[in-house]
Image (spheres, rainbow, N blue to C red):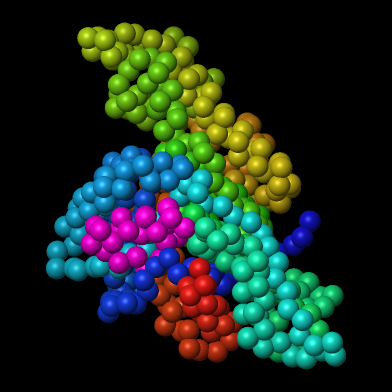
Amino acid sequence: MEKPIPQRHNSIISSGTGEVMKRAVNKDYLLAIDVGTTKICVVAARRNERKAIEVLGVGIHPCSGLSANGIVDLDEIVESITKAARKALSQAPGVDIHHAFVGITGSFIQSQNTVGSLVLSTHGRSVNQNDVELSINGAVNKTVPKDCLVLHAIPRWFRLDDTPYIRDPIGMEGSMLEVDIHLIIGRQTILKNLKRCVTMAGFTVEELVSQSIAASESVLTEEEKKSGVALVDIGGETTSLLVYFEGSIYHSETLEIGGEFITRDINHYFQTPMENAENLKKYSGSSFSESVDPEEMLEVIRFKNRRTIVVKKRLLSQVIEARVEQILEEVMRVLRARDLLGMLFAGIVLTGGTALMDGIRDKAKKMVKRDIHIGYPNGVVGHETIISSPIYTSVIGLLHYGFERRDAHLEMYGTGMKRFLQRTIRWIQERF
């Protein structure tokens, strides 16, 4: 098993899917827009005098314009972004924020690990920043299909001749330089249309960001990333899986299954309206039916004549449990197929709205036989009673990601690794 080298967050290289700094940006104010398959979540924030991220406003609006496979209703996405943003910004009077970091998910986003190499000299010479840039460019250039854009290119480690797992090869002597990177790419047409949705809503996209990358910024600790951890973000129609080991991303994948499937199961099985099915899932059901009193009953509203029937609460929980098992089994299938289970010494972190379901931690622990805990967003102040829920993991992570990316942009003319990484960003923007 190859061992990736820990990489700092500023080693994440991103594509030209944004319009960074085209007009004046107040670097201390930021809008995070999380585009999901069931809702749009927008958070307005600033970095206050103590350099802490302060949430100024939060807005959510239902949206079914994006499916796991792509955009199905562009106008609905635009309208939902507009309404969610209006609500968030209305809580911050006098604040005018136009630039946004946008979180996205779907099966149109794919990832893979790839290697780029560069012959330095048959006799050997010192590695410089341009060499590192060329090796990364080579890996991206040979791997990315013409119909795709790069969301993230994340260097995991470098090899110089026979020496692997080098963090920073600049200044070292050798004949052959290799770089191992984790690529996250998306279909060009879908990404451009998502960006267009945000633009039509009146905002400038600074960057499109994988939701799993964003979520990891708000719930995972550096110690967990080093020890080995899997982040499972259960969304509406998708579940995002992100695995860290030795501080670096080892694998990421989007599964076409999520919490909305549970709602539809309840809707179909009990012939109840979707709104009622969602409420039953949230407030009455459990994903661990063994813990439910077999004699407890509850009322369910049916479609026909809106009449009410009485059913056993355990039956509802069994319907929920069956789909939760399928979601977790899909996650386990990927972890086994990629031989990743053995490296999860810090266990598995569940997040997203479905992570709030009663009994899901116990169910997952029984199935996976690993330490399981629920990931809550952290590292921000303001509106704590609202944004402390796993529902906001991705959008709060976008705030962390966005402010760090802006800091890196301001340092792009400095020295060392940050400088060449920012030069590579510009190359990817031009090429992809």
Q: Does the magenta portion include 41?
A: no
Q: Residue 311: x percent and y percent?
A: 38, 10
**Residue at x-position 38% and y-position 14%:** 270
Q: Residue at x 63, y 86 (%)?
A: 129
Q: Quadrant of residue 28?
A: bottom left
| Stretch in magenta | 188-209
Image coords of residue 283 (percent x, y):
35, 28
- How many discs appear? 0
* Residue 378 shows in this picture: no
Which quarter shows the N terminus? bottom right
Measured from the top left, where is residue 202 in percent x and y?
23, 62
Along the line of sight, which residue is nearer the eye, 110 or 2?
A: 110
Q: Is residue 198 magenta?
A: yes
Residue 134 location (% of width, % of height):
64, 79
Name of the residue lying farthest toward the left: 94
Position of 385 with respect to 255 (left or right) is left
User: Does residue 196 lie above or below 323 as drawn?
Assistant: below
292 or 429: nearer the viewer: 429
Using the rendered image of the protein, determine whether residue 358 is visible from the camera's viewpoint: yes
Q: Residue furthest front?
A: 146
Which quadrant would residue 235 be assigned to in this image?
A: top left
Question: At x 38% / y 46%, what residue is drawn?
Answer: 71
| Residue 252 left/right relative to 303 | right
- Look at 66% across and 37% down and name the residue there: 333
